[in-house]
Image (spheres, coloured by chain):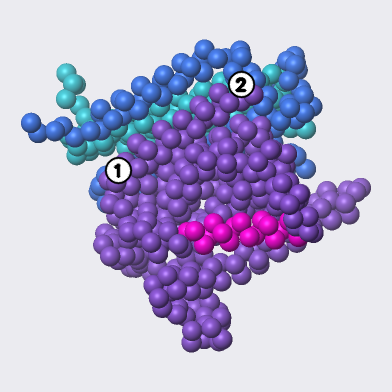
Amino acid sequence: MSILEAIFQPGWVDTALKVGIIVVKILVLIAVVMFHVAYATYFERKVIGRMQVRMGPMEVGPHGLLQPIADMLKLFFKEDIIPEKADKPIFYIAPIISLASAMSALAVIPFYKDFMVANINIGLLFVLAMSSLASYGIVLSGWASNSKYAFLGGLRSSAQVISYEIALGLSLVGVMMMSGSLNLNEIVKAQAAYPTGFYAIPQILGFFVFVVAAIAETNRAPFDLPEAESELVAGYFVEYSGMRFALFYAAEYIGMILMGCIASACYLGGWTVPWYLIKILPFLKYVPGIVWFVGKVYFIVFCYYWIRATLPRYRYDQLMSIGWKLLIPLALLNILITGILKVIF
Amino acid sequence: MVEAFFIYFALMVVFCSVMVVSRKNPVHSVLWMLVMFFHVAGLYLMLNAEFLAATQIIVYAGAILVLFLFVIMLLNLKEEIATEHSVGGWPGGLALAVSFLLFALLAFTGFTVKASGKWSIQEVSRLTHTKALGKVLYTEYLFPFEVASVILLVAIVGAVVLAKKKLKS
Amino acid sequence: MVPLNWYMWLGAVVFSVGMFGFLTRRNVIIMFLSIELMLNGVNISLVALSHYMQDLRGQVLTLFIIAVAAAEAAIGLAIVIAMFRNRQTVHVDEIKEMKG
Protein backbone atom coordinates (compact mmCIF):
# COMPACT_ATOMS: atom_id res chain seq x y z
CA MET A 1 0.00 0.00 0.00
CA SER A 2 2.69 2.45 1.02
CA ILE A 3 4.71 1.69 -2.13
CA LEU A 4 1.64 2.32 -4.25
CA GLU A 5 1.03 5.60 -2.45
CA ALA A 6 4.63 6.58 -3.02
CA ILE A 7 4.34 5.89 -6.73
CA PHE A 8 0.93 7.48 -7.23
CA GLN A 9 1.67 10.76 -5.55
CA PRO A 10 0.05 13.87 -7.02
CA GLY A 11 1.83 14.69 -10.28
CA TRP A 12 2.95 11.11 -10.90
CA VAL A 13 1.81 11.33 -14.52
CA ASP A 14 4.32 14.10 -15.02
CA THR A 15 7.13 12.11 -13.43
CA ALA A 16 6.21 8.97 -15.34
CA LEU A 17 6.20 10.95 -18.59
CA LYS A 18 9.64 12.37 -17.86
CA VAL A 19 11.05 8.95 -17.04
CA GLY A 20 9.36 7.51 -20.13
CA ILE A 21 10.95 10.12 -22.38
CA ILE A 22 14.38 9.37 -20.94
CA VAL A 23 13.88 5.62 -21.42
CA VAL A 24 12.81 6.14 -25.03
CA LYS A 25 15.86 8.35 -25.61
CA ILE A 26 18.15 5.68 -24.15
CA LEU A 27 16.59 2.94 -26.30
CA VAL A 28 16.91 5.03 -29.46
CA LEU A 29 20.52 5.84 -28.60
CA ILE A 30 21.43 2.19 -27.95
CA ALA A 31 19.78 1.05 -31.18
CA VAL A 32 21.49 3.73 -33.28
CA VAL A 33 24.87 3.18 -31.67
CA MET A 34 24.69 -0.61 -32.03
CA PHE A 35 23.81 -0.21 -35.71
CA HIS A 36 26.79 2.11 -36.08
CA VAL A 37 29.09 -0.36 -34.32
CA ALA A 38 28.03 -3.13 -36.72
CA TYR A 39 28.64 -0.98 -39.76
CA ALA A 40 31.83 0.56 -38.33
CA THR A 41 33.41 -2.89 -38.62
CA TYR A 42 32.26 -3.13 -42.24
CA PHE A 43 33.46 0.40 -42.95
CA GLU A 44 36.84 -0.40 -41.39
CA ARG A 45 37.37 -3.51 -43.48
CA LYS A 46 36.33 -1.68 -46.63
CA VAL A 47 38.57 1.35 -45.96
CA ILE A 48 41.60 -0.71 -45.03
CA GLY A 49 40.94 -3.02 -47.98
CA ARG A 50 40.92 -0.09 -50.38
CA MET A 51 44.09 1.33 -48.82
CA GLN A 52 45.80 -2.03 -49.38
CA VAL A 53 44.40 -2.29 -52.94
CA ARG A 54 41.95 -5.05 -52.05
CA MET A 55 38.17 -5.11 -52.28
CA GLY A 56 37.35 -5.85 -48.64
CA PRO A 57 34.24 -7.96 -47.84
CA MET A 58 32.26 -8.65 -51.04
CA GLU A 59 30.55 -12.02 -50.58
CA VAL A 60 27.52 -11.49 -48.31
CA GLY A 61 24.96 -9.25 -49.98
CA PRO A 62 25.69 -6.54 -52.57
CA HIS A 63 29.22 -5.20 -51.95
CA GLY A 64 29.29 -7.28 -48.76
CA LEU A 65 26.71 -5.03 -47.11
CA LEU A 66 25.21 -7.85 -45.04
CA GLN A 67 28.62 -8.93 -43.70
CA PRO A 68 28.14 -7.38 -40.20
CA ILE A 69 24.85 -9.25 -39.77
CA ALA A 70 26.50 -12.52 -40.76
CA ASP A 71 29.34 -11.86 -38.31
CA MET A 72 26.89 -11.10 -35.55
CA LEU A 73 24.91 -14.30 -36.17
CA LYS A 74 28.13 -16.31 -36.16
CA LEU A 75 29.23 -14.83 -32.81
CA PHE A 76 25.78 -15.43 -31.30
CA PHE A 77 25.78 -19.13 -32.08
CA LYS A 78 29.40 -19.85 -31.17
CA GLU A 79 30.14 -21.91 -28.11
CA ASP A 80 30.88 -19.86 -25.01
CA ILE A 81 34.16 -21.30 -23.71
CA ILE A 82 35.29 -20.51 -20.17
CA PRO A 83 38.80 -21.54 -19.10
CA GLU A 84 38.74 -24.07 -16.28
CA LYS A 85 41.09 -22.14 -13.97
CA ALA A 86 39.47 -18.77 -14.65
CA ASP A 87 38.04 -16.65 -11.85
CA LYS A 88 34.48 -17.09 -13.10
CA PRO A 89 32.56 -14.10 -11.65
CA ILE A 90 35.23 -11.66 -12.75
CA PHE A 91 35.54 -13.41 -16.09
CA TYR A 92 31.80 -12.86 -16.60
CA ILE A 93 31.62 -9.21 -15.58
CA ALA A 94 34.80 -7.92 -17.26
CA PRO A 95 33.32 -7.51 -20.78
CA ILE A 96 30.17 -6.02 -19.27
CA ILE A 97 32.23 -3.38 -17.44
CA SER A 98 33.97 -2.53 -20.71
CA LEU A 99 30.72 -2.17 -22.64
CA ALA A 100 28.78 -0.37 -19.89
CA SER A 101 31.47 2.23 -19.26
CA ALA A 102 31.73 3.03 -22.97
CA MET A 103 27.94 3.14 -23.39
CA SER A 104 27.11 5.27 -20.38
CA ALA A 105 29.53 8.00 -21.43
CA LEU A 106 27.38 8.49 -24.55
CA ALA A 107 24.57 9.76 -22.30
CA VAL A 108 26.04 13.26 -22.01
CA ILE A 109 26.93 13.78 -25.68
CA PRO A 110 24.82 16.50 -27.34
CA PHE A 111 23.92 14.98 -30.71
CA TYR A 112 21.73 17.87 -31.67
CA LYS A 113 20.74 21.15 -30.08
CA ASP A 114 19.70 20.21 -26.51
CA PHE A 115 19.21 16.55 -27.49
CA MET A 116 21.11 14.50 -24.94
CA VAL A 117 20.01 11.81 -22.55
CA ALA A 118 21.40 13.61 -19.50
CA ASN A 119 22.03 17.34 -19.58
CA ILE A 120 24.35 17.58 -16.58
CA ASN A 121 26.73 20.31 -15.52
CA ILE A 122 29.76 18.04 -15.24
CA GLY A 123 29.32 16.35 -18.63
CA LEU A 124 32.96 16.39 -19.64
CA LEU A 125 34.09 15.10 -16.23
CA PHE A 126 31.52 12.33 -16.50
CA VAL A 127 33.00 11.26 -19.84
CA LEU A 128 36.49 11.23 -18.32
CA ALA A 129 35.24 9.24 -15.34
CA MET A 130 33.62 6.63 -17.54
CA SER A 131 36.62 6.31 -19.83
CA SER A 132 38.80 5.80 -16.77
CA LEU A 133 36.64 2.80 -15.90
CA ALA A 134 37.25 1.19 -19.28
CA SER A 135 40.65 0.04 -18.06
CA TYR A 136 38.97 -2.15 -15.43
CA GLY A 137 37.33 -4.30 -18.05
CA ILE A 138 40.66 -4.87 -19.75
CA VAL A 139 42.75 -5.46 -16.62
CA LEU A 140 40.19 -7.77 -15.06
CA SER A 141 39.64 -9.81 -18.20
CA GLY A 142 43.40 -10.22 -18.51
CA TRP A 143 43.72 -11.32 -14.92
CA ALA A 144 40.62 -13.51 -14.70
CA SER A 145 41.49 -15.51 -17.82
CA ASN A 146 44.45 -17.03 -15.98
CA SER A 147 46.57 -17.06 -19.10
CA LYS A 148 50.00 -15.52 -19.65
CA TYR A 149 49.16 -13.73 -22.89
CA ALA A 150 45.95 -12.28 -21.54
CA PHE A 151 47.68 -11.23 -18.34
CA LEU A 152 50.52 -9.46 -20.15
CA GLY A 153 47.98 -7.67 -22.34
CA GLY A 154 46.02 -6.61 -19.29
CA LEU A 155 49.06 -5.27 -17.45
CA ARG A 156 50.29 -3.39 -20.48
CA SER A 157 46.90 -1.91 -20.99
CA SER A 158 46.43 -0.75 -17.43
CA ALA A 159 49.70 1.16 -17.55
CA GLN A 160 48.94 2.55 -21.00
CA VAL A 161 45.38 3.65 -20.31
CA ILE A 162 46.27 5.34 -17.01
CA SER A 163 49.17 7.22 -18.62
CA TYR A 164 47.21 8.44 -21.60
CA GLU A 165 44.18 9.36 -19.53
CA ILE A 166 46.24 12.14 -17.97
CA ALA A 167 47.10 13.55 -21.38
CA LEU A 168 43.47 13.18 -22.49
CA GLY A 169 42.14 15.04 -19.47
CA LEU A 170 44.77 17.78 -19.65
CA SER A 171 44.14 18.36 -23.35
CA LEU A 172 40.45 18.94 -22.63
CA VAL A 173 41.30 21.50 -19.91
CA GLY A 174 42.04 24.04 -22.66
CA VAL A 175 38.51 23.61 -24.00
CA MET A 176 37.05 23.93 -20.52
CA MET A 177 39.00 27.17 -20.00
CA MET A 178 37.90 28.68 -23.31
CA SER A 179 34.23 27.84 -22.93
CA GLY A 180 34.06 28.29 -19.15
CA SER A 181 31.81 25.26 -18.77
CA LEU A 182 31.92 21.51 -18.33
CA ASN A 183 28.53 20.98 -19.94
CA LEU A 184 29.08 19.70 -23.49
CA ASN A 185 25.95 21.49 -24.71
CA GLU A 186 27.32 24.81 -23.41
CA ILE A 187 30.74 24.04 -24.91
CA VAL A 188 29.21 23.62 -28.38
CA LYS A 189 27.22 26.85 -27.97
CA ALA A 190 30.36 28.69 -26.85
CA GLN A 191 32.16 27.47 -29.96
CA ALA A 192 29.42 28.72 -32.26
CA ALA A 193 29.83 32.16 -30.67
CA TYR A 194 33.63 32.09 -31.06
CA PRO A 195 35.20 33.95 -34.05
CA THR A 196 36.65 30.81 -35.68
CA GLY A 197 33.44 28.82 -35.16
CA PHE A 198 35.22 25.84 -33.61
CA TYR A 199 38.04 25.30 -31.13
CA ALA A 200 40.33 23.12 -33.24
CA ILE A 201 42.16 26.21 -34.56
CA PRO A 202 42.91 28.12 -31.33
CA GLN A 203 43.34 24.81 -29.49
CA ILE A 204 45.41 23.14 -32.20
CA LEU A 205 47.96 21.87 -29.66
CA GLY A 206 45.25 20.49 -27.41
CA PHE A 207 43.48 18.92 -30.40
CA PHE A 208 46.67 17.13 -31.45
CA VAL A 209 47.25 15.80 -27.93
CA PHE A 210 43.59 14.78 -27.68
CA VAL A 211 43.61 12.82 -30.94
CA VAL A 212 46.81 10.91 -30.09
CA ALA A 213 45.68 10.22 -26.54
CA ALA A 214 42.24 9.14 -27.75
CA ILE A 215 43.80 6.55 -30.06
CA ALA A 216 45.90 5.19 -27.19
CA GLU A 217 42.96 5.30 -24.80
CA THR A 218 40.85 3.12 -27.09
CA ASN A 219 43.78 0.71 -27.70
CA ARG A 220 43.76 1.21 -31.45
CA ALA A 221 46.70 0.95 -33.87
CA PRO A 222 49.45 2.21 -33.68
CA PHE A 223 49.01 1.96 -29.90
CA ASP A 224 47.26 -1.43 -29.84
CA LEU A 225 49.91 -3.07 -27.67
CA PRO A 226 47.42 -4.65 -25.23
CA GLU A 227 46.16 -6.82 -28.06
CA ALA A 228 49.24 -6.86 -30.31
CA GLU A 229 48.26 -9.96 -32.30
CA SER A 230 51.75 -10.75 -33.54
CA GLU A 231 53.28 -11.04 -30.06
CA LEU A 232 50.42 -11.56 -27.59
CA VAL A 233 48.05 -13.52 -29.90
CA ALA A 234 45.14 -11.22 -29.08
CA GLY A 235 46.10 -9.83 -25.70
CA TYR A 236 43.56 -9.48 -22.94
CA PHE A 237 40.61 -11.14 -24.68
CA VAL A 238 42.45 -14.17 -26.06
CA GLU A 239 40.44 -16.55 -23.83
CA TYR A 240 37.07 -15.05 -24.71
CA SER A 241 34.81 -16.45 -27.38
CA GLY A 242 31.34 -16.09 -28.79
CA MET A 243 29.09 -13.45 -27.28
CA ARG A 244 31.59 -12.25 -24.65
CA PHE A 245 34.18 -11.64 -27.32
CA ALA A 246 31.56 -9.66 -29.24
CA LEU A 247 30.97 -7.48 -26.16
CA PHE A 248 34.66 -6.53 -26.06
CA TYR A 249 34.62 -5.88 -29.76
CA ALA A 250 31.54 -3.67 -29.45
CA ALA A 251 33.09 -1.81 -26.50
CA GLU A 252 36.18 -1.02 -28.58
CA TYR A 253 34.12 0.41 -31.42
CA ILE A 254 31.82 2.33 -29.08
CA GLY A 255 34.97 3.76 -27.51
CA MET A 256 36.06 4.95 -30.94
CA ILE A 257 32.68 6.46 -31.71
CA LEU A 258 32.65 8.10 -28.27
CA MET A 259 36.05 9.68 -28.86
CA GLY A 260 34.78 10.86 -32.24
CA CYS A 261 31.75 12.41 -30.51
CA ILE A 262 33.91 14.21 -27.94
CA ALA A 263 36.28 15.49 -30.61
CA SER A 264 33.28 16.66 -32.60
CA ALA A 265 31.60 18.37 -29.61
CA CYS A 266 34.72 19.86 -28.01
CA TYR A 267 36.92 20.78 -30.94
CA LEU A 268 34.96 20.67 -34.20
CA GLY A 269 31.84 22.60 -33.22
CA GLY A 270 29.37 19.74 -32.70
CA TRP A 271 26.05 20.28 -34.48
CA THR A 272 26.90 23.87 -35.54
CA VAL A 273 28.47 25.22 -38.70
CA PRO A 274 30.93 28.14 -38.57
CA TRP A 275 29.09 31.40 -39.31
CA TYR A 276 31.48 32.40 -42.13
CA LEU A 277 30.66 29.19 -44.01
CA ILE A 278 26.96 30.08 -43.84
CA LYS A 279 27.80 33.57 -45.08
CA ILE A 280 29.57 32.13 -48.14
CA LEU A 281 27.10 29.30 -48.79
CA PRO A 282 23.72 30.40 -47.32
CA PHE A 283 21.93 27.13 -48.17
CA LEU A 284 24.04 25.31 -45.55
CA LYS A 285 21.82 26.57 -42.74
CA TYR A 286 19.00 24.30 -43.95
CA VAL A 287 21.13 21.21 -43.31
CA PRO A 288 19.99 19.75 -39.96
CA GLY A 289 22.54 19.87 -37.15
CA ILE A 290 22.60 16.12 -36.62
CA VAL A 291 24.08 15.72 -40.11
CA TRP A 292 26.98 17.98 -39.22
CA PHE A 293 27.55 16.19 -35.94
CA VAL A 294 27.48 12.72 -37.43
CA GLY A 295 29.60 13.82 -40.37
CA LYS A 296 32.30 15.06 -38.02
CA VAL A 297 32.16 11.80 -36.06
CA TYR A 298 32.49 9.78 -39.28
CA PHE A 299 35.49 11.87 -40.26
CA ILE A 300 37.26 11.15 -36.95
CA VAL A 301 36.45 7.44 -37.20
CA PHE A 302 37.77 7.40 -40.76
CA CYS A 303 40.99 8.98 -39.47
CA TYR A 304 41.29 6.10 -36.99
CA TYR A 305 41.19 3.59 -39.88
CA TRP A 306 43.51 5.72 -41.98
CA ILE A 307 46.10 5.80 -39.17
CA ARG A 308 45.70 2.07 -38.61
CA ALA A 309 46.33 1.31 -42.26
CA THR A 310 49.35 3.62 -42.46
CA LEU A 311 51.43 3.47 -39.28
CA PRO A 312 53.33 0.51 -37.79
CA ARG A 313 52.88 -0.39 -34.12
CA TYR A 314 55.04 1.37 -31.52
CA ARG A 315 57.30 -0.47 -29.13
CA TYR A 316 56.12 -0.40 -25.52
CA ASP A 317 58.86 1.89 -24.19
CA GLN A 318 58.29 4.25 -27.12
CA LEU A 319 54.60 4.35 -26.29
CA MET A 320 55.32 5.26 -22.68
CA SER A 321 57.88 7.91 -23.55
CA ILE A 322 55.49 9.51 -26.07
CA GLY A 323 52.82 9.65 -23.41
CA TRP A 324 54.86 11.00 -20.55
CA LYS A 325 57.62 12.99 -22.24
CA LEU A 326 55.77 14.47 -25.21
CA LEU A 327 51.99 14.54 -24.79
CA ILE A 328 51.71 15.56 -21.12
CA PRO A 329 54.23 18.46 -21.41
CA LEU A 330 52.49 19.58 -24.62
CA ALA A 331 49.11 19.53 -22.89
CA LEU A 332 50.51 21.53 -19.96
CA LEU A 333 52.03 24.02 -22.40
CA ASN A 334 48.64 24.30 -24.07
CA ILE A 335 46.99 25.08 -20.74
CA LEU A 336 49.63 27.75 -20.04
CA ILE A 337 49.18 29.39 -23.45
CA THR A 338 45.39 29.29 -23.16
CA GLY A 339 45.58 30.86 -19.72
CA ILE A 340 47.91 33.64 -20.87
CA LEU A 341 45.70 34.39 -23.88
CA LYS A 342 42.64 34.40 -21.66
CA VAL A 343 44.27 36.96 -19.34
CA ILE A 344 45.43 39.19 -22.21
CA PHE A 345 42.17 39.24 -24.19
CA MET B 1 11.51 9.22 -1.86
CA VAL B 2 14.84 10.89 -1.05
CA GLU B 3 15.04 8.78 2.10
CA ALA B 4 14.60 5.64 0.03
CA PHE B 5 17.55 6.62 -2.16
CA PHE B 6 19.63 7.40 0.90
CA ILE B 7 18.81 4.07 2.50
CA TYR B 8 19.72 2.19 -0.68
CA PHE B 9 23.06 4.01 -1.02
CA ALA B 10 23.87 3.69 2.68
CA LEU B 11 23.09 -0.03 2.83
CA MET B 12 25.18 -0.67 -0.28
CA VAL B 13 28.09 1.37 1.08
CA VAL B 14 28.06 -0.53 4.37
CA PHE B 15 27.63 -3.91 2.68
CA CYS B 16 30.46 -3.24 0.21
CA SER B 17 32.83 -2.00 2.90
CA VAL B 18 32.20 -5.15 4.94
CA MET B 19 32.92 -7.20 1.80
CA VAL B 20 36.16 -5.25 1.24
CA VAL B 21 37.59 -6.17 4.62
CA SER B 22 36.27 -9.75 4.65
CA ARG B 23 37.25 -11.15 1.20
CA LYS B 24 40.22 -13.53 1.04
CA ASN B 25 41.08 -12.68 -2.53
CA PRO B 26 42.49 -9.12 -2.69
CA VAL B 27 41.21 -8.66 -6.27
CA HIS B 28 37.65 -9.27 -5.08
CA SER B 29 38.25 -6.77 -2.26
CA VAL B 30 39.29 -4.15 -4.78
CA LEU B 31 36.18 -4.80 -6.87
CA TRP B 32 33.87 -4.39 -3.89
CA MET B 33 35.72 -1.17 -3.17
CA LEU B 34 34.93 -0.04 -6.71
CA VAL B 35 31.22 -0.67 -6.17
CA MET B 36 31.44 1.21 -2.89
CA PHE B 37 33.07 4.24 -4.52
CA PHE B 38 30.17 4.44 -6.95
CA HIS B 39 27.65 4.50 -4.14
CA VAL B 40 29.65 7.11 -2.24
CA ALA B 41 29.61 9.19 -5.43
CA GLY B 42 25.84 8.72 -5.47
CA LEU B 43 25.67 10.08 -1.93
CA TYR B 44 27.72 13.10 -3.01
CA LEU B 45 25.23 13.70 -5.81
CA MET B 46 22.42 13.61 -3.24
CA LEU B 47 24.33 16.27 -1.29
CA ASN B 48 24.59 18.48 -4.41
CA ALA B 49 28.35 17.96 -4.66
CA GLU B 50 28.51 16.93 -8.31
CA PHE B 51 32.14 17.93 -8.82
CA LEU B 52 33.20 15.82 -5.86
CA ALA B 53 31.20 12.89 -7.22
CA ALA B 54 33.10 13.10 -10.51
CA THR B 55 36.41 13.48 -8.66
CA GLN B 56 35.56 10.47 -6.55
CA ILE B 57 35.18 8.33 -9.68
CA ILE B 58 38.09 9.81 -11.65
CA VAL B 59 40.69 9.89 -8.88
CA TYR B 60 39.61 7.12 -6.53
CA ALA B 61 38.15 4.58 -8.93
CA GLY B 62 40.10 5.53 -12.04
CA ALA B 63 43.56 6.06 -10.59
CA ILE B 64 44.08 4.92 -7.01
CA LEU B 65 42.16 1.68 -7.23
CA VAL B 66 43.74 0.71 -10.57
CA LEU B 67 47.10 1.20 -8.86
CA PHE B 68 46.03 -1.22 -6.14
CA LEU B 69 44.90 -3.73 -8.74
CA PHE B 70 48.16 -3.34 -10.58
CA VAL B 71 50.25 -4.03 -7.47
CA ILE B 72 48.10 -6.99 -6.36
CA MET B 73 48.61 -8.61 -9.75
CA LEU B 74 52.38 -8.35 -9.37
CA LEU B 75 52.25 -10.35 -6.14
CA ASN B 76 51.71 -14.03 -5.48
CA LEU B 77 47.96 -14.51 -5.19
CA LYS B 78 47.67 -18.30 -4.95
CA GLU B 79 49.62 -18.36 -1.71
CA GLU B 80 47.62 -15.41 -0.39
CA ILE B 81 44.28 -17.13 -0.85
CA ALA B 82 45.52 -20.29 0.85
CA THR B 83 46.83 -18.66 4.03
CA GLU B 84 45.11 -17.25 7.10
CA HIS B 85 43.96 -13.72 6.33
CA SER B 86 43.78 -12.07 9.73
CA VAL B 87 46.41 -11.49 12.40
CA GLY B 88 46.37 -13.41 15.67
CA GLY B 89 44.95 -10.62 17.77
CA TRP B 90 41.86 -9.99 15.66
CA PRO B 91 39.30 -10.08 18.53
CA GLY B 92 41.03 -7.06 20.04
CA GLY B 93 40.71 -5.18 16.74
CA LEU B 94 37.05 -6.13 16.48
CA ALA B 95 36.38 -4.96 20.03
CA LEU B 96 38.11 -1.65 19.40
CA ALA B 97 36.19 -1.05 16.16
CA VAL B 98 32.83 -1.98 17.70
CA SER B 99 33.41 0.24 20.73
CA PHE B 100 34.37 3.12 18.49
CA LEU B 101 31.24 2.51 16.44
CA LEU B 102 28.97 2.50 19.51
CA PHE B 103 30.62 5.65 20.77
CA ALA B 104 30.16 7.43 17.44
CA LEU B 105 26.55 6.26 17.00
CA LEU B 106 25.66 7.58 20.43
CA ALA B 107 27.56 10.81 19.89
CA PHE B 108 25.75 11.61 16.64
CA THR B 109 22.24 10.88 17.92
CA GLY B 110 20.19 13.99 17.45
CA PHE B 111 23.20 15.86 16.10
CA THR B 112 22.22 18.91 14.03
CA VAL B 113 23.95 22.03 12.77
CA LYS B 114 22.74 25.49 11.91
CA ALA B 115 22.94 26.55 8.26
CA SER B 116 25.29 29.46 8.78
CA GLY B 117 27.43 29.75 5.64
CA LYS B 118 26.66 31.81 2.55
CA TRP B 119 26.74 28.92 0.05
CA SER B 120 23.08 27.93 0.04
CA ILE B 121 21.81 25.35 -2.45
CA GLN B 122 20.35 28.09 -4.65
CA GLU B 123 23.63 30.01 -4.64
CA VAL B 124 25.67 26.94 -5.54
CA SER B 125 23.32 25.82 -8.30
CA ARG B 126 23.17 29.36 -9.73
CA LEU B 127 26.94 29.37 -10.09
CA THR B 128 27.22 25.58 -10.75
CA HIS B 129 29.01 23.53 -8.15
CA THR B 130 32.33 23.35 -10.01
CA LYS B 131 32.61 27.15 -10.20
CA ALA B 132 31.57 27.65 -6.60
CA LEU B 133 34.11 25.13 -5.35
CA GLY B 134 36.77 26.66 -7.58
CA LYS B 135 36.05 30.13 -6.21
CA VAL B 136 36.54 28.96 -2.64
CA LEU B 137 39.53 26.76 -3.49
CA TYR B 138 41.48 29.40 -5.41
CA THR B 139 40.84 32.30 -3.08
CA GLU B 140 40.49 31.20 0.53
CA TYR B 141 42.45 27.97 0.18
CA LEU B 142 45.11 28.89 -2.36
CA PHE B 143 48.04 28.19 -0.08
CA PRO B 144 46.82 24.73 1.05
CA PHE B 145 46.14 23.99 -2.61
CA GLU B 146 49.76 24.71 -3.50
CA VAL B 147 50.92 22.62 -0.56
CA ALA B 148 48.77 19.75 -1.83
CA SER B 149 50.49 19.95 -5.20
CA VAL B 150 53.89 19.78 -3.49
CA ILE B 151 52.71 16.73 -1.54
CA LEU B 152 51.73 15.05 -4.80
CA LEU B 153 55.12 15.90 -6.31
CA VAL B 154 56.89 14.41 -3.30
CA ALA B 155 54.72 11.31 -3.64
CA ILE B 156 55.64 10.90 -7.31
CA VAL B 157 59.38 11.23 -6.62
CA GLY B 158 59.16 9.01 -3.55
CA ALA B 159 57.24 6.28 -5.36
CA VAL B 160 59.75 6.22 -8.22
CA VAL B 161 62.72 6.08 -5.83
CA LEU B 162 61.17 3.34 -3.70
CA ALA B 163 59.91 1.09 -6.44
CA LYS B 164 62.89 1.41 -8.78
CA LYS B 165 65.23 -1.55 -9.06
CA LYS B 166 68.78 -0.87 -7.95
CA LEU B 167 70.98 -0.63 -11.04
CA LYS B 168 74.00 -2.92 -10.94
CA SER B 169 77.06 -0.74 -11.38
CA MET C 1 14.82 15.50 3.69
CA VAL C 2 17.39 13.13 5.14
CA PRO C 3 18.51 14.23 8.62
CA LEU C 4 22.18 15.11 8.99
CA ASN C 5 22.93 12.51 11.61
CA TRP C 6 22.05 9.68 9.22
CA TYR C 7 25.01 10.75 7.12
CA MET C 8 27.18 11.04 10.22
CA TRP C 9 26.13 7.56 11.31
CA LEU C 10 26.95 6.18 7.89
CA GLY C 11 30.36 7.85 8.00
CA ALA C 12 31.00 6.36 11.43
CA VAL C 13 29.99 2.87 10.30
CA VAL C 14 32.26 3.00 7.26
CA PHE C 15 35.08 4.39 9.39
CA SER C 16 34.81 1.62 11.95
CA VAL C 17 34.60 -1.09 9.29
CA GLY C 18 37.82 0.35 7.87
CA MET C 19 39.32 0.44 11.35
CA PHE C 20 38.42 -3.21 11.86
CA GLY C 21 40.05 -4.13 8.55
CA PHE C 22 43.17 -2.15 9.33
CA LEU C 23 43.61 -3.73 12.73
CA THR C 24 42.92 -7.32 11.77
CA ARG C 25 44.07 -8.08 8.21
CA ARG C 26 47.56 -9.45 7.58
CA ASN C 27 47.85 -8.37 3.97
CA VAL C 28 49.31 -4.89 3.83
CA ILE C 29 47.42 -4.08 0.61
CA ILE C 30 44.08 -4.78 2.29
CA MET C 31 45.28 -2.59 5.15
CA PHE C 32 45.79 0.24 2.69
CA LEU C 33 42.31 -0.41 1.28
CA SER C 34 40.98 -0.16 4.83
CA ILE C 35 42.66 3.21 5.22
CA GLU C 36 40.88 4.34 2.06
CA LEU C 37 37.62 3.10 3.61
CA MET C 38 38.26 5.18 6.71
CA LEU C 39 39.04 8.24 4.61
CA ASN C 40 35.80 7.68 2.69
CA GLY C 41 33.86 7.53 5.91
CA VAL C 42 35.34 10.87 6.93
CA ASN C 43 34.62 12.30 3.47
CA ILE C 44 30.94 11.36 3.67
CA SER C 45 30.62 13.20 6.99
CA LEU C 46 32.53 16.22 5.72
CA VAL C 47 30.45 16.61 2.56
CA ALA C 48 27.22 16.13 4.52
CA LEU C 49 28.24 18.71 7.11
CA SER C 50 29.26 21.11 4.37
CA HIS C 51 25.88 20.67 2.67
CA TYR C 52 23.87 21.17 5.84
CA MET C 53 25.97 24.12 7.05
CA GLN C 54 25.78 25.69 3.56
CA ASP C 55 29.51 26.19 3.64
CA LEU C 56 31.95 24.83 1.08
CA ARG C 57 34.87 24.41 3.47
CA GLY C 58 34.07 20.77 4.15
CA GLN C 59 34.06 19.97 0.45
CA VAL C 60 37.41 21.72 -0.05
CA LEU C 61 38.77 19.57 2.77
CA THR C 62 37.40 16.50 1.00
CA LEU C 63 39.28 17.48 -2.15
CA PHE C 64 42.49 17.74 -0.12
CA ILE C 65 41.80 14.36 1.46
CA ILE C 66 41.41 12.82 -1.98
CA ALA C 67 44.74 14.37 -3.05
CA VAL C 68 46.48 13.10 0.07
CA ALA C 69 44.90 9.66 -0.41
CA ALA C 70 46.38 9.53 -3.91
CA ALA C 71 49.82 10.45 -2.55
CA GLU C 72 49.47 7.92 0.25
CA ALA C 73 48.46 5.13 -2.12
CA ALA C 74 51.40 5.85 -4.44
CA ILE C 75 53.99 5.86 -1.64
CA GLY C 76 52.39 2.98 0.24
CA LEU C 77 52.20 0.72 -2.79
CA ALA C 78 55.80 1.58 -3.70
CA ILE C 79 56.78 0.45 -0.20
CA VAL C 80 54.78 -2.75 -0.72
CA ILE C 81 56.67 -3.45 -3.93
CA ALA C 82 60.04 -2.78 -2.27
CA MET C 83 59.01 -5.00 0.64
CA PHE C 84 57.89 -7.80 -1.63
CA ARG C 85 61.12 -7.61 -3.58
CA ASN C 86 63.25 -7.93 -0.43
CA ARG C 87 61.13 -10.26 1.72
CA GLN C 88 58.79 -12.05 -0.76
CA THR C 89 55.86 -11.35 1.54
CA VAL C 90 53.13 -8.77 2.00
CA HIS C 91 52.07 -9.96 5.45
CA VAL C 92 52.70 -7.50 8.23
CA ASP C 93 53.23 -10.13 10.93
CA GLU C 94 56.09 -11.73 9.00
CA ILE C 95 58.14 -8.53 8.98
CA LYS C 96 59.62 -8.65 12.47
CA GLU C 97 63.37 -8.07 12.12
CA MET C 98 63.15 -5.07 14.42
CA LYS C 99 61.34 -7.01 17.12
CA GLY C 100 63.43 -7.37 20.28
Vertical placement of residue B1 versus A313, above or below: above
Binning the other alpha carbons within 10 Å of mark 1 as few (below 14), some (14 to 19) or many (20 upward) gives few
Q: Assess whether residue A293 is covered by the magenta stretch.
A: yes
| Side of A32 where A76 appears, left or right | left
Vertical placement of residue A33 versus A329, above or below: below
Q: Which chain is cyan?
A: C
Subunit of label 1 = B
Task: In the displayed orientation, state which residue is furthest to the left.
Answer: B169
Q: Which label sits on residue B84?
A: 1
| Side of B165 where A218 appears, left or right | right
Whole-percent x and y of residue A244?
Answer: 47, 68
Q: Which chain is purple?
A: A
Q: Which label sits on residue A344?
A: 2
Does dot 1 land on a helix, a strand or a loop? loop
Residue C12, can we see it?
no
Whole-percent x and y of residue B24?
Answer: 37, 46
| Side of A180 where A85 appears, left or right | left
Whole-percent x and y of residue A252?
Answer: 48, 60
Q: Between tags 1 and 2, which lies in front?
A: 2
Magenta-colored span: A287-304
Residue B94 falls in image quadrant:
top left
Does dot 2 land on a helix, a strand or a loop? helix
- Residue plotted at (52% across, 86% down): A60
Subunit of label 2 = A
- Identify the image quadrant of the C terminus of chain B: top left
- Residue plotted at (61% across, 12% down): B140
Name chain B's colour: blue
